[in-house]
C-alpha cells in the first residue's frame, strides 16, 4: 500500500500547502458554459494566434519536463513531483521538498524513458534541489532560462508538470504579484522565527499536488520560475490541497544564483543582516504608525537586531524593548532603501540581497530615525 508524502505547511494568514505529493483521486470535471455568438466572432482570430503559441510552447518545452517518483528504503512509492532539465550533462532542477527524505528517485521522461536520479545538492531555504541522471543525449532537452526581473504583473505564464500524477499537463494563467517573501518553515533563525524565502512569483496558473518542481514559463517558452506551493483552504477527499488561484513559484533569477552552487558544492551560502522587521504598509494600522512617530507609511521597521550581527556592528537600532510591553514600542530604525533601491516592504530588502549580494559584500542601508535620514554601511555575513 502506498504511503503518501505529508504536504508541508507554512502559515502567513492562510495555510500555504506545498504541492509535491501524489493524489489518489481526481477532481470532478466541470463543463464551461458557452459564450454568446458576438463574443465568439470578436475573439476567434486572437484565440487562434494564442492557441498556436501555446501549442508551440508545449511541443518545445514538454520533452524537457520530467516526472520524479519518490521511494523509501523499502521500495515503497511515497509520491511524485515534477522537474526539468537544466543542462545537457544530466542535471535536473526540482524542489527540495520533492526529494526530501527519499531513499531512491525514479525520473521519467515524456518519451517513455526511465532512469534513476541522484541528489547532488539541496537548499531548504529556496526550496530547490538538483538531481543528476545518466540518460542518452536525445532524452536531455535543457530548457531556456528567462529573466524574472523582466516580468510584469498581468503577464501571461504557463506551467507544465504532473498534477495528481497526470503526466505532462499544461496550465496557463497570469503573474498575480512579484517579489513575495514567504517564511521557510525548515530554516529557523537564531533569534526565533524563520528566515524568509525571497523573490517569489505569485500566479493564478492552476497548480496542484504533483506540480512542484515543474517550470513556470513565459510566452517565449523560457523558464521564469519553479512552481513550489499553493495557498488554499480546500482539499480533496483524500486530504490533498487543491488549487484556489493562488500559487507560488521561485523566480528563475534565484535559480540562476542557487543552482550553480548546488552543482559545485552541494549548497548555497546566503547573505545575512541579522534583523527582524515589520512592514509598515502591510502590518501596521494608522494608529500604530502614529504612536510610533513614523513619518511615512512604507518601509521595514526594525523590531530586533541580533547581537554581533552585521546590522548590530553597523549600528542599526531596534525598537525599544520591554518584557512587560504588550504593544510595539517606538525607537526603531525604519529601513527605506538599500544601495539606493527603495524598500517599500521587507520583501524588497530580502529580494535585493538574495538576487544580487553574497557574504562579504558591502551594502548601504538607508534608515529613517524620526525625521533624520541616516546611511549605514554593512558588510554581509554568511547566514548562521
Image: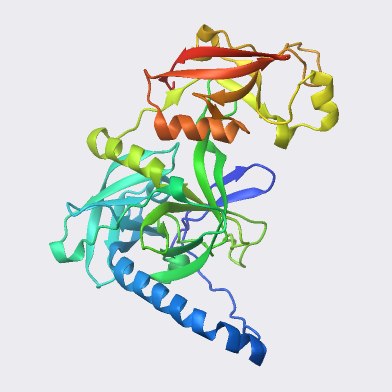
Q: Is residue 189 above or below residue 372?
A: below
Quarter placement of the C terminus: top left
Q: Which residue is drawn at the image coordinates 53% and 72% (left, top)?
A: 25
Q: Is residue 180 above or below residue 274?
A: below
Task: Residue lying at the far left in this picture: please name it.
Answer: 136
Residue situated in front as seen by the camera: 178 or 236: 178
Q: Which residue is drawn at the image coordinates 29% and 38% (left, top)?
A: 262
Residue situated in front as seen by the camera: 234 or 196: 196
Way the structure is coloured: rainbow
Q: Position of residue 353 (x, y in %)?
A: 46, 29
Q: Is residue 191 visible?
A: no
> In the figure, residue 360 lies in which quadrant?
top left
Q: Position of residue 59 (x, y in %)?
A: 32, 73
Query: How many labels were placed on the picture?
Result: 0
Quarter placement of the N terminus: bottom left
> In the figure, residue 282 lies in which quadrant?
top right
Q: Position of residue 154 (x, y in %)?
A: 57, 58
239 horizontally vs 59: left or right: right
Q: Which residue is drawn at the image coordinates 50% and 56% (left, top)?
A: 19
Residue situated in front as seen by the camera: 149 or 12: 149
269 horizontally vs 22: left or right: left
Q: Is residue 151 above or below residue 10?
A: below
Residue situated in front as seen by the camera: 380 or 324: 380
52 horizontally vs 319: left or right: left
Q: Is residue 196 visible?
A: yes
Q: Which residue is drawn at the image coordinates 34% and 32% (left, top)?
A: 268
Q: Position of residue 35 (x, y in %)?
A: 65, 86
Amino acid at each position: 500500500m502506498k504511503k503518501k508524502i505529508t504536504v508541508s505547511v507554512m502559515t502567513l494568514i492562510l495555510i500555504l500547502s506545498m504541492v509535491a505529493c501524489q493524489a489518489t483521486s481526481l477532481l470532478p470535471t466541470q463543463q464551461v458554459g458557452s459564450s454568446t455568438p458576438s463574443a465568439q466572432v470578436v475573439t476567434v482570430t486572437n484565440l487562434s494566434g494564442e492557441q498556436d503559441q501555446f501549442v508551440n510552447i508545449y511541443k518545445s518545452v514538454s520533452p524537457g519536463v520530467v516526472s520524479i517518483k519518490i521511494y523509501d528504503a523499502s521500495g515503497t512509492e511515497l509520491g511524485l513531483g515534477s522537474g526539468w532539465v537544466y543542462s545537457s550533462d544530466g542535471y535536473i532542477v526540482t524542489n527540495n521538498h520533492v526529494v526530501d527524505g527519499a531513499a531512491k528517485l525514479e525520473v521519467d521522461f515524456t518519451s517513455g524513458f526511465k532512469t534513476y536520479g541522484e541528489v547532488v545538492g539541496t537548499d531548504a531555504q529556496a526550496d530547490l534541489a538538483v538531481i543528476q541522471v545518466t540518460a542518452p543525449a536525445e532524452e536531455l532537452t535543457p530548457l531556456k532560462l528567462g529573466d524574472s526581473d523582466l516580468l510584469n504583473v498581468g503577464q501571461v505564464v504557463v506551467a507544465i508538470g504532473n498534477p495528481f500524477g497526470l503526466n505532462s499537463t499544461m496550465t496557463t494563467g497570469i503573474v498575480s504579484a512579484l517579489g513575495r517573501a514567504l517564511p521557510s518553515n525548515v530554516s529557523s533563525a537564531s533569534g526565533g522565527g524563520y528566515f524568509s524565502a525571497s523573490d517569489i512569483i505569485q500566479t493564478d496558473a492552476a497548480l496542484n499536488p504533483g506540480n512542484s518542481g515543474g517550470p513556470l514559463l513565459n510566452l517565449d517558452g523560457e523558464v521564469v520560475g519553479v512552481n513550489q506551493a499553493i495557498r488554499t483552504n480546500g482539499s480533496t477527499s483524500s486530504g490533498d490541497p487543491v488549487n484556489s488561484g493562488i500559487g507560488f513559484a521561485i523566480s528563475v533569477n534565484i535559480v540562476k544564483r542557487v543552482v550553480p552552487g548546488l552543482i559545485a558544492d552541494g549548497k548555497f551560502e546566503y547573505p545575512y543582516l541579522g534583523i527582524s522587521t515589520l512592514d509598515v504598509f502591510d502590518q501596521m494600522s494608522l494608529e500604530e504608525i502614529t504612536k510610533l512617530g513614523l513619518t511615512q507609511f512604507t518601509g521595514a521597521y526594525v523590531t530586533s537586531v541580533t547581537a554581533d550581527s552585521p546590522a548590530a556592528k553597523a549600528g542599526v537600532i531596534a525598537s525599544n524593548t520591554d518584557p512587560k510591553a504588550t504593544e510595539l514600542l517606538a525607537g526603531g530604525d525604519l529601513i527605506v532603501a538599500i544601495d539606493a533601491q527603495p524598500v517599500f516592504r521587507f520583501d524588497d530588502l530580502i529580494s535585493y540581497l538574495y538576487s544580487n549580494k553574497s557574504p562579504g559584500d558591502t551594502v548601504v542601508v538607508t534608515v529613517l530615525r524620526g525625521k533624520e535620514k541616516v546611511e549605514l554601511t554593512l558588510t554581509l555575513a554568511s547566514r548562521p
